[in-house]
Image: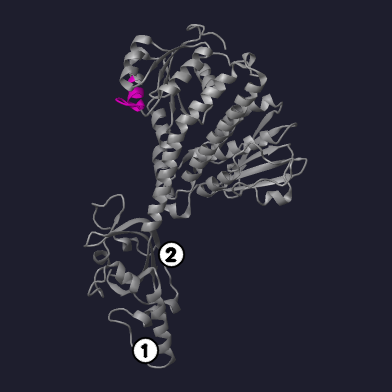
Amino acid sequence: MAYSSNSFGRWLKTLFGPGDAVEKASAGPEQAEHERTVAILNSLPDAVFVVGAKGAIDLANGAAQELMGNPPSWRQERFVEMLPLRPRTKPADKPVNVLEGGLSPQRRRDLRLTRADKTSVDLDLSVTPVQPDGGAAYYIVVARDITQERSLDRQREEFIAVASHELRTPLAIMEVALSTALLAKTSLKPQIFSLIGQAHRNTVFLADLVKDLTTLSEAQNDNLPIALKPVDASALVRTLGIDFEQQAKAKGLPIQVTLSPDIPSILSTEHYIHEVLQNFLTNALKYTDKGHITLSAAPSQNGGVRFGVADTGVGISAGDQQHLFTKFYRTEDYRTRETGGTGLGLYLCLELAERLNAKVWCESTIGKGSTFYLEVPPFSTLKQDHGKVVEAQVSNLVDQL
Amino acid sequence: MNKPTGHKLGRILLVEDDITLAGLYKMRMETEGFDVKHVGNGEEALQAAKEYRPDLVLLDIMMPKLDGFDVLDILHNTPALKGMKIVILSAIGEAEEQAKAMELGADEYLVKSQVLIAEVMARIRSHLNLPPLPEAE
């Protein structure tokens, strides 16, 4: 959708107005207003360009001129040539023409500018087409330097990836050794058995922490594409019910699976949904001593699927419910205080849900039990990944043909 | 601890380049009644699969010489080894790698330290159609 705001268009036109430099405004209050606006634009840290319908630059603020390498002349030069942008991952490609999108606004975070002196800058770019009433369309292009931000992201991702890979083998060694030692219970002194037991429980805790941190880092990484595939919600819920049956039986809790007959098909990332529901189920088992656990899936109002995990456990106070999805939150109530968890489980659920453009929440009454919900839209994606939805829809259709 | 009971329960080929971890897995699997052969790289794994004829291969991914994906691909496409189960046990946890292994014909993908050894043993029993061990107290 393009801007059609008449006043905005007129304002821009008087300011920089197509063709030659800034239109001379008559002296007086208008002149002062005009100078102030130009000063504001020039003081912005983001580069702002106004580009005519034919791709020639009408205006570049201070940051934009700097981004182009302060060329001696830029007015009416072609934007694509003055700012050659290529996908970061394909530096040998032809420069991308970001104005090609016609009258649809665009947002791109995958482009890199490489200047003549070989220096390069990663950009977050937004292109907003403006269509003044009765006038020719033009584009406002705003570019932000995200080189440093991306480099920090990369370092963080790399650290977590390397750390988790490197931690897994020693953790596995500790876990297998301690668990195997515990098999010899009858030949161990009770005190020694208890000490090894403590070491084993904490090794498992550490392994859980590494797992949660890795998944969290994956969920928070916006640059990681999300793989959208048709998800069979009913099959997913049935499998989870079977997976948790043993653990639930060990606590004397039956798991009931309730499936609506009219569950729609959704495009999403199954292992994220699985991870969230698994967290809900683990909590339900931890905080329920008698009664039962119900795992359900039903259509949601927005055409997606609402998953639910209901228990008849201790319940959560209204005060605690507000903070449940916060990192490392510990409930105030001793009855519901988590002892064995990493404190990241529900926070992770929230982050994964956001990644899927889904919602998580909880309804609970102390002493009666809690229900945790995950509502997944028909197409799971962040707004900025909109193109991917279309791609996934198309490939899904092709698969069906 | 129980004494090893020979290969009554089945033969397992353990492909793992970390000697310490391999020693522990071997001890645990033998304790639970399996016959275990250990090799430390992909090339030896191919050889051992043909000679030892395991019922199940517990296969690491990151290994010298031939990596786990190559081994998996070859073993899965060897008609003489049809019916042999292949379970990946790797420190790599990325969904993409897991999907790749499953496409290449793995029966299951387990991530080291994220799946406890008791569960690894339960999965092995299940793949070999053995009844689950009675619940530990």
- Say which element carries label 1: loop
At label 1, counting other C-alpha atoms closer than 10 Å, the crowd grade (few under 14, some 14-19, many 20 or more) is some
On screen, residue A85 versus residue A267, left or right, reads left
Q: Nearer the viewer, residue A189 or B82?
A: A189
Residue at which label 2 appears: A1
Q: Residue at x 77, y 40 (%)?
A: A368
Residue A62 makes an appearance in the image: yes
Residue A401 makes an appearance in the image: no
Q: Nearer the viewer, mark 1 or mark 2?
A: 1
Residue A340's place in the image compared with A350, above or below, is above
- In the rendered structure, which amino acid carries the disc numbered 1? Ala
On screen, residue B108 versus residue A251, left or right, reads left
Residue A59's place in the image compared with B77, above or below, is below
Q: Picture coordinates of residue A160 (x, y %)?
A: 44, 43
Question: Is residue B67 shown in magenta?
Answer: yes
- In the rendered structure, which amino acid carries the disc numbered 2? Met
Residue at which label 1 appears: A25
Residue A334's place in the image compared with A243, above or below, is below
Magenta segment range?
A: B63-74
Label ID, residue A112: none
Q: Picture coordinates of residue A143 (x, y %)?
A: 37, 65
Q: Nearer the viewer, residue A247 or A329?
A: A329
Q: Residue furthest right?
A: A367
Distance from Cα at disc 1 to Cα at disc 2: 31 Å
Q: Quadrant of the N terminus of chain A?
A: bottom left
Q: Picture coordinates of residue B38 (x, y %)?
A: 40, 16
Question: Is residue B18 shown in magenta?
Answer: no
Question: If you read the primary sequence from the N terminus, does the residue marked by circle 1 or circle 2 appear first?
Answer: 2
Q: Residue at x 50, y 48 (%)?
A: A355
- Say which element carries label 2: loop
